[in-house]
Amino acid sequence: MSKEIKSVEYGLEKIFDGAQDFLPLLGTDYVEFYVGNAKQAAHFYKTAFGFQSHAYAGLETGVKDRASYVLKQDKIRLVLTTALKSDSPIGEHVKKHGDGVKIAALWVEDARSAYEETIKRGAKSYMEPTVETDEHGEVVRAGIYTYGETVHMFVERKNYHGEFLPGYKKWESDYNPAPVGLKYIDHMVGNVGWNEMNTWVKWYEDVMGFVNFLSFDDKQITTEYSALMSKVMSNGNGRIKFPINEPAEGKKKSQIEEYLDFYEGSGIQHIAVATDDILATVADMRSRGIEFLSTPPQAYYDSVPLRLEAHNHKLQEDINKLMALGIMIDADEEGYLLQIFTKPVEDRPTLFFEVIQRMGARGFGAGNFKALFESIEREQEKRGTL
């Protein structure tokens, strides 16, 4: 077991002793997708994922070049933005990448300081500190580029009491499907090109003050056909976690290579959303049309009790119910976790979601990697991209 992996077993606090404190992050503020049709995408995320109408900006609010729909579920905010004219950089982004994550916004106490500190450490500017105001107060935002065309936006909203941001109005709708129990964003995973992972690990260390608290190489994340490498980056308080994946050599094309081909570059591969009751959440999502990866074989579930006992944990859930839904189980010294992955949520095989419930575990399901990747490879085979 590598040093990085072992360190997580003793709690994150020890490894975070080395994290720098120049960029205190309070949490994820919002995630903004650039999409081809925001109105229709909003309907999908409301219907299938249980998000609620929250705020809107567009022609009716004085915005001339785009329309944005803000959806909310507990602490999660998604912004779906579409271009209103063909010469828009938003439209160009969608043309190249398909629907995908453009901005991973981070909630900060001081956006100007966050911008200045990261710029002087080598970040490339996306947006200089900008004060946005309306009758509800002011928000300060500033942004920097990370891998590909993805952006981290720093959002300071301590002097704002409106719905979302200045320029948005409350979005009222008669169509409000119930939430499915999603609570917050647990982590967001980025895919980068061949031999670029360590470059971006260093970027997060140097520019953002993050630490690498967990690492997996191609001996741990491998199947008969494909492999990848991954390192998990986290900020000092552990609230923000960005695993970074790169391809590794295998007999056939890995899911990372498939993503890079169809996204046409580096970007956010999946968003992990947390729930307190994964059985209820996944059953509800399935009933609303969300498709998940295929269920691991019976032998996988037969091995679960022994894997948990090795860490002195006992499964509280009914394993037959977990198996019926295809939910996977993994354990570390701190506890265990339950997780499942959707199929891509659009026609390009790029972005997907993970649903996760942590029962004390702080890891990322290392014991599930082989079963997970074999499920993904079965989907790649159907698409002819393996």
Image: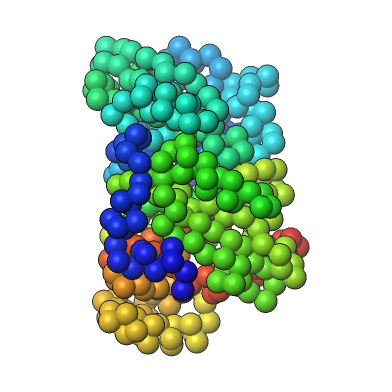
Res 336 visible: no
The spot of residue 13 in percent (x, y) is: 28, 56
Please give the name of the residue rendered at 48% of the width and 15% of the height, measured from the top-left corner. Answer: 63
In the rendered view, tell whether residue 322 sits above or below residue 57: below
Q: Residue at x 43, y 63 (%)?
A: 4
Q: Residue at x 35, y 49 (%)?
A: 18
- Which residue extends farthest front? 18
250 relative position to 277: left or right: right
Q: Position of residue 37 (x, y in %)?
A: 57, 33
User: To which quarter of the image does residue 31 belong?
Assistant: top left
> Which image quadrant for residue 281?
bottom left
Q: Is residue 309 above or below residue 295?
A: below
> Residue 129 lies in what quarter of the image?
top left
Q: Which residue is at the front of the view, 10 or 35?
A: 10
Q: Position of residue 239 (x, y in %)?
A: 33, 47
Q: In the displayed structure, does residue 323 sit left or right of residue 73?
A: right
Residue 95 in view of the camera: yes
Residue 383 relative to residue 372: left or right: right
Residue 383 at x, y percent in the picture: 71, 61
